Amino acid sequence: MLRHSQRLSLLLLLVLAATARGQAAGTGPKVLEPWLLGLTAVVVFLFIVFVVLLINRFWNLRMRRGR
């Protein structure tokens, strides 16, 4: 079974690999509409907050079990 840090590393590696694969298409840069760019920024921000809250929750659960 993978430990939490190993799972997080694997997830990060998969995300980076998927991003690199998407850039390798060679279709050139695409210009997003301003509303789509803003929507993307909000979604990414909310995802980052969600991940940080999950990490915080697991960290607190781990600390409580240690007592």
Image (spheres, rainbow, N blue to C red):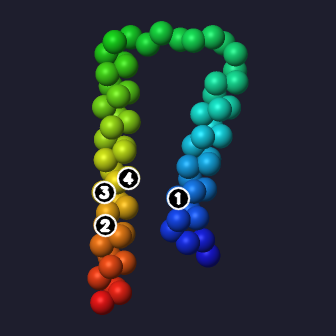
* The image quarter in which residue 23 lies: top right
Q: Secondary structure at mark 4?
A: helix
Q: Secondary structure at mark 3?
A: helix
**Mark 3 vs mark 4, CA separation in Å:** 5 Å
Task: Find residue 17 and report its horizontal and vertical position in percent.
Answer: 65, 40
**Image quarter in which the C terminus is found:** bottom left
Disc 2 target residue: 57
Q: Are marks 1 and 2 in contact (CB under 8 Å)?
A: no
The disc, 4 or 1, on the residue closer to the chain's N-terminal end is 1
Disc 3 target residue: 53
Disc 4 target residue: 51
Q: Secondary structure at mark 1?
A: helix
Disc 1 target residue: 8
Q: What residue is shown at x 60% (from left), y 71% (from top)?
A: 2
Q: Answer left or right for 4 relative to 53.
A: right
Q: Residues within 10 Å of mark 4 (few under 14, many from 20)?
A: few
